[in-house]
Amino acid sequence: MSRGNQPQASGRPGPFGFYQAPSIRELRKRLQLRGTDTPEAIEERVLKARKEVRYASRFDVVLINDDLTTCFEGSGGMCG
């Protein structure tokens, strides 16, 4: 697990937010539509996301990136 998945290890004060796509399927779709990554790079990112989502509970807030306004409101101001 990378240091980014261990929010308390950063030494910075919280709160810490974990941002995730609504689903792995949606993540894959977004990456494909973006058109900037190779199919191999997309699969690597999807595999990484599958692993990282296991650590979401270590964060203070889990935000589902499905709607910008809702996600921002759910962040409690952490974004801005």
Image (tube, grey):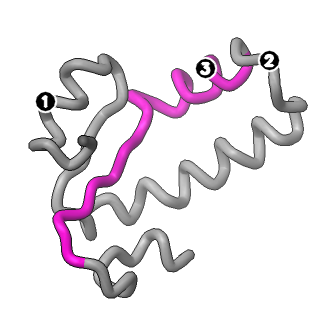
Q: Is there a contact, CB below 8 Å, between mark 3 and mark 2? A: no
Q: Position of residue 67 (x, y in %)?
A: 30, 17
The kind of residue tagged 1 is: Glu
Q: Is there a contact, CB below 8 Å, between mark 1 and mark 2? A: no
Horizontally, is 33 left or right of 16 in the view? right
Q: Is residue 71 above or below residue 1?
A: above
Q: Quadrant of residue 34?
A: top right
Q: Position of residue 64 (x, y in %)?
A: 30, 34
The kind of residue tagged 3 is: Arg
User: What is the spatial separation of the Cα atoms under label 1 and label 2, in whole angstroms?
Assistant: 29 Å
Circle nearer the N terminus (3, 2): 3
Residue marked by disc 3: 30
Q: Is there a contact, CB below 8 Å, between mark 3 and mark 1? A: no
Mark 3 neighbour class, 10 Å CA radius: few under 14, some 14 to 19, many 20 or more: few
User: What secondary structure is marked by label 1?
Assistant: helix
The kind of residue tagged 2 is: Gly
Residue drawn at point x = 54 percent, y = 50 percent: 50
Residue marked by disc 2: 35
